[in-house]
Amino acid sequence: MKRTLTFALLLILSAGLFAQNHFPLVADHYQLELSFDFPKETLKGRCQMTILNQSDSAITQIPLLLYRLLKVNSVKNSDGDELKFAQSVVQFEDRTKLQANHILVDYEIPPHESKVIHIDYGGHLLGYTETGWRYVTDRISPEFTLIRMDTYAYPLISQPSISFLINNLRQHLFNYDIVVTVPDTLVVANGGRLQSRTPAPDNQMTYHYSSKKPAWRIDIAISPYSQLNTEVLHIFYLNDEKSAMRIAESGANAMQQYTQWWGGLQSPEAVTIIETEKNSGGQADELVILLPEESFSNINNFHNLYHELAHLWHVFIRENEGISPRWEEGLADFSAYLINETLYEERAGLVKRAANNNLRRLKRDFERNPALQNIPLMDYGNHRLTNLSYVQPMVMFSVLYYWVGEEVFHNTIGGFYQEYIETGASTKDFINYWKLMAASVNLNGFFEDWIYTPRFAEFVMEEKSFDDILEYYINSTQQ
Ligand SMILES: [Zn+2]
């Protein structure tokens, strides 16, 4: 549901987005220190941000966002000098029910240089349910506290505009260190590497985590968590130990299967799963999955887990021009269905059923917005249509799988990972790799239809079934 809402919103915004493309300032590193006053329901934050200017000219003002009830007390440079800033609670340009504290810091960052600023802030966190984001119920409470990007609980570089913010976050990944102090009856959960856990005065405990990989968001959950750690998964769970054990087992089985298909990971890192409060919405970064209680305890729904684990084998896709279309989302979704089908006999036929569902979903979207029929997958990033990146490429990869066969398919996905994991690659590199590995079929027309042109939309609008489409390509090679 949430996906659909965001999708609609992105469509409306996509026209205006290009103009704001590539705001030059991006966060390169966060050092975030947090402590809480639970009776007063307040937090205190000290945020040291390293900000990079990616442009050829100096930038003299840094725009920041914070949650509407969080106030900045001071901003300093790395020498400890106070910087001039203004703050005011404003309405978002593109979502008028949404308010945030908009902070403008006067500070010059020379071209292609980075500067450090220290932001001292604090206040309340009461969610954003009034905006229609029913899942954002974040608050400060000893039962459950969630600090995340969705509420702007830490400073983010942006003007008060969702499209601006999403655009900026997607531009550049950052590393982070978080230092969080809580009463020692509580546990701080985060997807980074735990560097230390040190007792602090007044029966408190300070947790220091560092990001394992560059990220686009920071998620910190605080609760009386229990933990279950395996080689593959670090699980923070609230009460449901049985589900935690099932998730651990299921994750291990999936990892074993993926490894058999695609070969071992070059630098294996455990994936962290954090159970969150009921109805608080799921989220996933590369190595962190937030699973709300209702998903966590629903043992039949491992799709998200399998999807995230599949991403571990994905090369970072960077286009020479434009924004990545993120077809790896469709690949992860395809892989999650395939794992389900492989591990559970009773789920035979799942991939094809899901592909047919996705074809119907595309048709509905195309009917609602006919302009989408003319946009090739390659432009999904440029048009901010990456919600479709879960749907269209899932069908594409399913066709490929049944067309070239299991062995060639897995050798290609695994081989591409081994070949490009260090350097990253472009979509073009991926296609060339496919042509090399699957030389027995002619993939030229196929990638034209599904990646570079919107030809695939004709199949969609003609209501072709998955098997029809598969047969079309099998026959095309034979002619
Ligand atoms: Zn994904």
Image (cartoon, grey):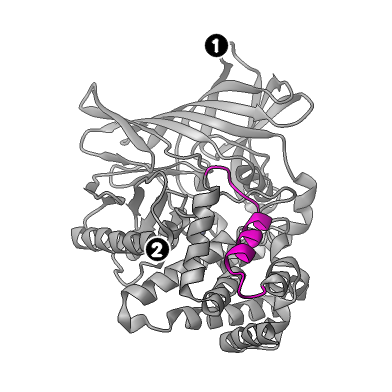
Return the x and y of residue 351 as percentages of the image width and height.
47, 78
- Residue ranking furthest to the front: 440
Which residue bears the numbered disc 2? 306
Q: Earlier in the sequence, mark 2 or mark 1?
A: 1
Residue 35 in sight from this viewpoint = yes
Q: Nearer the viewer, residue 378 or 279?
A: 378
Which residue bears the numbered disc 1? 80
Going 26% across and 40% down the picture, which residue do you hit? Answer: 187
Q: Which residues are magenta?
A: 422-442
Q: Nearer the viewer, mark 2 or mark 1?
A: 2
On whether residue 440 falls in the magenta region, the answer is: yes
Return the x and y of residue 362 as percentages of the image width and height.
63, 77
Q: Is residue 45 above or below residue 20?
A: above
Instruction: Please tell me how crowded label 1 is: few (under 14), some (14-19), or many (20+) other residues with Cα within 10 Å.
Output: few
Q: Nearer the viewer, residue 322 or 471?
A: 471
Residue 281 in sight from this viewpoint = no
In the rendered structure, which amino acid carries the disc numbered 1?
A: Gly
Assign a secondary structure to mark 1.
loop
Going 53% across and 63% down the picture, which residue do you hit? Answer: 412
In the rendered structure, which amino acid carries the disc numbered 2?
A: Tyr
Return the x and y of residue 326 as percentages of the image width and height.
61, 58
For marks 2 and 1, give the CA distance.
Answer: 46 Å
294 left or right, relative to 287: left
Going 59% across and 42% down the picture, which residue do you hit? Answer: 100
Return the x and y of residue 143 as percentages of the image width and height.
28, 47
Assign a secondary structure to mark 2.
helix
On whether residue 8 falls in the magenta region, the answer is: no
Tag on residue 95?
A: none
